[in-house]
Amino acid sequence: MQEAFLEQLTPSQRQAVCHREGPLLVLAGPGSGKTRVITHRIAALIDWGVKPYNICAITFTNKAAEEMRQRAGALGASGGAHISTFHSLCVRILRIYADAAGVHPNFSIYDESDQVRCIKEAIRNCDLDVANFPPGRILEAVSTLKNKLVDPDTFRAQAEDFFSQSLLQVYTRYQQILADRNGLDFDDLLMKAALLLEGNSAVCRELSERFKFVLIDEYQDTNHAQHRLTRALVSSHNNICAVGDPDQSIYRWRGADTRNILAFEKDWPDATVVKLEENFRSTAEVLRVADRLIARNRNRKEKVLVPVKTHTGEVRIDNYEDENAEARAVARQVEELVASGVSGSEIAVFYRVNAMSRALEEAFILHKVPYQVVRGVEFYNRKEIRDVLAYLKVIVNPADEIALQRIINTPARGIGKVTVDRAIMHAARNRMSLFDAIRNVDQIDGLSGAVKAKLAAFVQVIDGLAQNMQGKVAPFVERVFKVSGLEETLKSAGREGQDAVENIEELISTAAAYDEQTENPSLVDYLQQIALFSDADAYDASNERVALMTLHAAKGLEFENVFIIGLEHGILPHERSGENGEDLEEERRLLFVGVTRAKTNLYISYARYRTVRGQTLRTIPSEFLFELGPGLMRASVEQESRPTAEPAFPKAKPAPSPSNGQKAPQFVPGQLVRHKTFGLGRVKKFRDMGPDSVVVISFNSGQTKSLLLKCADLVRV
DNA sequence: TCGAATTCCGTTTTT
DNA sequence: CGGAATTCGA
């Protein structure tokens, strides 16, 4: 291999790229050129004469897939190689082998809100109470089972206790409801594809021989289903190249299992292991902090980050009065950076939860700093978008009752709840789909002639549209928008309607883009593709706007200047992340991911008060702050004790008057107390600071809060 | 049947 | 506190 593109690589990278055949594991720290190894390897394989058609690269997000296609293209490996996420790959497999997998190729992909509707119905069908079986919890349990490839039949043998028995009933019913509607949820995509490959040797062999080389990025975040799918996929050749970093595993809550990467050599005993420990991304200052932090994790293989960059950077911890002061200070610093010539695209702000973007957005607007919030879903969640998509789904898959119920009276056409309920009853009695029921509307009892005519008219609209659904998608979407009557309704709805129309126009242009870049565009394929898209995929690094995103969304990105806000106990680590060490370690990895996105400067901050859901609470600094390194936190505390810490932003907080000059009541750990909103709880800790005393209470609801005594209004029980 | 009002619900991270 | 689902009244 004398190719020029190999010369940019370090010896270790080159070793990985030029590995010929057999299993290969690349253990690589942040900023070590992981993804580059994959793109170069794709190019190298093609260089050796492997057909692009025989290469399958799997990334974590659609965005990453798109980027990889471009980069591989730039190396001359353009076109042909299959580069996508696990989920997209599974969609393709399930569509091609629909019969063998036991699904209809026009299946709808059900997102979370669709899932909630189905699971609620399943819970009701099983005569269980939604109060005792919260849909969210049940869905979580079902998801966990699916991620472990436990289908209802398999689960039947394991379900022993009462809860498992009930769960089994609901799970079985839920799957039946989905099957009736030709619907698959995200987890089904993985489970059905994996079980298909494991259970059908012909399909397995065919796919394994098609994809002679499989490359997987972010392997530390694969779950059990993905692992089993991978094993089946490479079973006839073991040409797997897995790339990842156990320290950057941040999706345990979604079933990701680091054992997949840690036990790689057990799964493939003849694996070649290459380690990449040089870091080309960050300054030594940033890496020292990252190193110190992640070293606290006990459940980990030790690894150091070796800096390559020689110029210096700044790492700072700041603290502010509250979230608004914090947001304004960040906006001001960003403003200064931009004024000094830094591009907005080299600045990012990370936070733990999406809700924290609010204060930032207000501050950025105030400072007139252009920004973009990189957030999950959003665009595809807008009402008007969902409406149009529901029409498309019904046309493609008339069994999709969720979509059908959404549009049957949207726009309003005089088909009310009573009518729909009658039709549903009729369909259930005669074991037919809702759409078939209204198609034969005459057979439904108790409907007036006028209502029957309205239903027949609706069926005609759908049938009429369905006749020319072939070919390009964009013109069809436009037609649906018109014929459905949605356009007319929105256009006569004033300002808001106008916004909605513009959103639909944007949808049509994304459909046009799909038509452009897809060989055989089809409505089914389009719907199944966009179901797997998130707004993080829409992040546009080419514009000059500062990026605001969650720490999770930051994965895989890098910026010269990084701000991480809200380093407070309960936020990072998040209170809902549980008390056990495993969860805490994942929160630490999350911060580690954030820290290692910074190429040069890193500004971490926390606030002394934060308003969460209308409650202003005294915060406790995150324990992670102290782990980042000695000195950093001390500097921050000195700043805090300065009398004029934030002269530009005078305190807005009205200090609640100490109760009639009385001495603040004392609490001792163990004391039982009652709070207006949180209910009963037990005092865990009491910090006596006079009127500013802080009580840490573990409430019976399971959550632990630290409350400012003078605001909390606690009653001894 | 429809739109407005009200209650009630939950509230991490996302393919 | 804010959004969604449900109920209520026209």
Image (spheres, coloured by chain):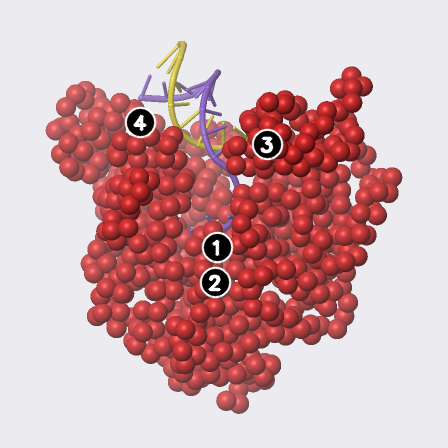
Chain colours: A red, B purple, C yellow
Under circle 2, the secondary element is loop
Circle 3 residue: A682
Circle 2 residue: A258
How far, Cα to Cα, is label 4 from label 2?
A: 53 Å
How far, Cα to Cα, is label 3 from label 1?
A: 30 Å
How far, Cα to Cα, is label 3 from label 4?
A: 56 Å
* Mark in the foreground, 3 or 1: 3
Give the mark, 3 or 1, whose residue is nearer the N terminus: 1
Disc 4: host chain: A
* Mark in the foreground, 1 or 4: 1
Which amino acid, mark 2?
Thr
**Quarter-wise, where is residue A455 in the image?**
top left
How far, Cα to Cα, is label 1 from label 2?
A: 8 Å
**Labels 1 and 4 positioned on one and the same chain:** yes
Q: Is residue A269 visible?
A: yes
Badge 1 local density, few (<14 within 10 Å), some, or many (20+)?
some
Disc 3: host chain: A
**Labels 4 and 2 positioned on one and the same chain:** yes
* Mark in the foreground, 3 or 2: 3
**x, y percent for residue A202:** 21, 70
Give the mark, 1 or 2, whose residue is nearer the N terminus: 1
Q: In the image, what residue occupies the spot 43% across and 55% down? A: A255
Q: Nearer the viewer, residue A10 or A625?
A: A625
Q: In the image, what residue occupies the spot 60% across and 69% down? A: A302
For this view, does A558 lie left or right of residue A382? right
Question: From what the image shows, is residue A21 above or below residue A374?
Answer: below
Determine which of the numbered discs, if any, sits on residue A376 in the image.
none
Which amino acid, mark 3?
Arg
Question: From what the image shows, is residue A383 above or below residue A30?
Answer: above
Determine which of the numbered discs, if any, sits on residue A413 in the image.
4
Determine which of the numbered discs, if any, sits on residue A252 in the image.
1
